[in-house]
Image (tube, rainbow, N blue to C red):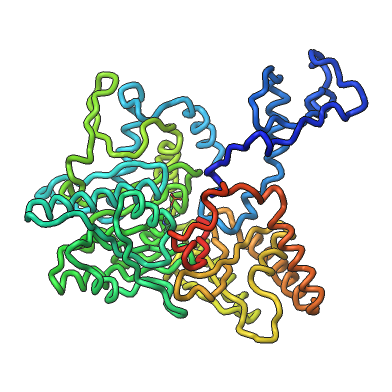
Amino acid sequence: MVHLAKVKKDNEVPPSTHDIVSVAPPDIDDFETNVYGSHFAADHMPLHEMPEREMPRQIAARMIKDELSLDGNPKLNLASFVTTYMEDEIEQIMTESFSKNFIDYEEYPHSAEIQNRCVNMIARLFHIPTDASGENAMGTSTIGSSEAIMLGTLAMKKRWQNKRKAEGKDYSRPNIIMNSAVQVCWEKAARYFEIEEKYVYCTDTRFVIDPKQAVDLVDENTIGICAILGTTYTGEYEDIKAINDLLVERNIDCPIHVDAASGGFVAPFIQPDLKWDFRLEKVVSINVSGHKYGLVYPGVGWVIWRSPEYLPQELVFNINYLGADQASFTLNFSKGASHVIGQYYQLIRLGKHGYRAIMSNITRISDYMSSEFEKMGMVILSQTQGRGLPLVAWRLPTDDSRIYDEFAVAHQLRERGWIVPAYTMAPNSEKLQMMRIVIREDFSMHRCDSLLQDFKLAIESLDAMDKSMLDKYKTHMKNHRNHPRHQSRVHAHYMNEKHSLQGQTGKTHGVC
Ligand SMILES: *Cc1c(COP(=O)(O)O)cnc(C)c1O
């Protein structure tokens, strides 16, 4: 809830400390001096009230840049799937496209056309049926997989409602079936669109959906099943074919939406024979994040539907905007065109061969890291050899005499600059703590070796601590978490919520 900002009340805003500085400030209009000689350098940054006066652009830019330099280094952030590297050539074009509003199809028809090409390429990558007999499939760009999943969920709900209405049956109690290890956007989609969540819970040894349990949960009110190609915890691919085959075998009319946020740009290159996509007849829609293994900076996702049957007409708006008709199915209206253009660049610049080369390199690095962790006695929870996402999830070996846990290891690594998160697993396996490293395009073998060295040092430091030292270290960790920078962000009204999986079970969400 970092982003739902709390507006401070007057008594929470510290009084100005201006007057306690004894030396007279530089002349307010004297901007000849450098940034740090101006009075702004000795003032507090404006925090709550918009300043009355302007600030010179160089100074504003420098102040913001200086503040952002205290953020972590994205390259050392091993927690996230989201792209941290793109080539200079496309960075330049994306910067030039900032001022284009993607929704203005009439003004920027080429940007719109570029999106359509991306939809076509991605749909074909996912084996969309393209034979002449059926109706055309369709898809759209989104801000990310979350928006794509909201749209996919709405489409499944509306289709189900229409079917129920036509049969003269009650359509007030829709439900959706998913694994308790789902990304938080699925919980949001269910809550926002008033759909009951039916969970297949993970166990201590199974972190993916159980296909039989999932299909057993289907009833007349089920709008669909969510299956994940690459869960955020262990990166494992759920057995989508098994769910499909059970639905076919039992002749159940229940669609599958595949959440391929991460796996959608990995599996087609590393495991081309794995059947998880539109080759399975029950799969009606698929989302993928362009900004994960699609290799674009954050701000783009995709969703594809098998045919208009699965995207009811009443959700699609034909708008005549600036003189041109356009069909639109999105949650928002205006957005920048840069990220869609960035996606097109990656698709044509790399081609299938280029994506395959990158994905196989990071799969090999991930396998290497996994085997090195195993040698250190860690318990590996993720897959290797491309059977799952290129990531390593592991936990410390079971050892009653060990006095530290995964969160302490994460803190040690953080002190060395690496962001490697520790998690509490999904419900019913929630006592399980784990750590996870996501291997992204720019994580080379050399960086992997540096990380492994620091990991060994982290473990040695913790092993060397006796009980009293470790207690002090834990206090230090707690103080760090309570640092003003990390604190007081959650609005008191929303603290301790009990409605989500996290609120109910202590599941911590995987960073994506
Ligand atoms: C990242 C992720 C999401 C959310 O995707 P965004 O593109 O960040 O909105 C949803 N599901 C899974 C499995 C993910 O990994």
Q: Residue furthest front?
A: 11
Q: Residue furthest top?
A: 29
The image shows residue 74 at horizontal and vertical percentages of 62, 49
In which image quadrant can residue 33 be found? top right
The image quadrant where one finds ligand 1 is bottom left
Residue at 37% x, 42% y is 142
> Is residue 499 depicted above or below 70 in this figure?
below
Q: In front: 185, or 1?
A: 1
> Is residue 380 depicted above or below 338 in this figure?
below
The image shows residue 453 at horizontal and vertical percentages of 72, 68
Residue at 56% x, 71% y is 434
The image shows residue 486 at horizontal and vertical percentages of 66, 51
Q: Please indicate whether residue 204 sits to the left or right of residue 287 in the image.
A: right
Q: Residue furthest bottom?
A: 400
> Is residue 375 depicted above or below 434 in this figure?
below
Q: Please indicate whether residue 392 sits to the left or right of residue 330 in the image.
A: right
The image shows residue 452 at horizontal and vertical percentages of 67, 68
Q: Residue furthest right?
A: 23
Residue at 63% x, 71% y is 406
> Is residue 19 depicted above or below 251 in this figure?
above
In which image quadrant can residue 266 be found? bottom left
Q: In front: 323, or 97?
A: 323
In which image quadrant can residue 174 be found? bottom left
Q: Please indicate whether residue 75 sits to the left or right of residue 429 in the image.
A: right
Q: How many numbered discs?
A: 0
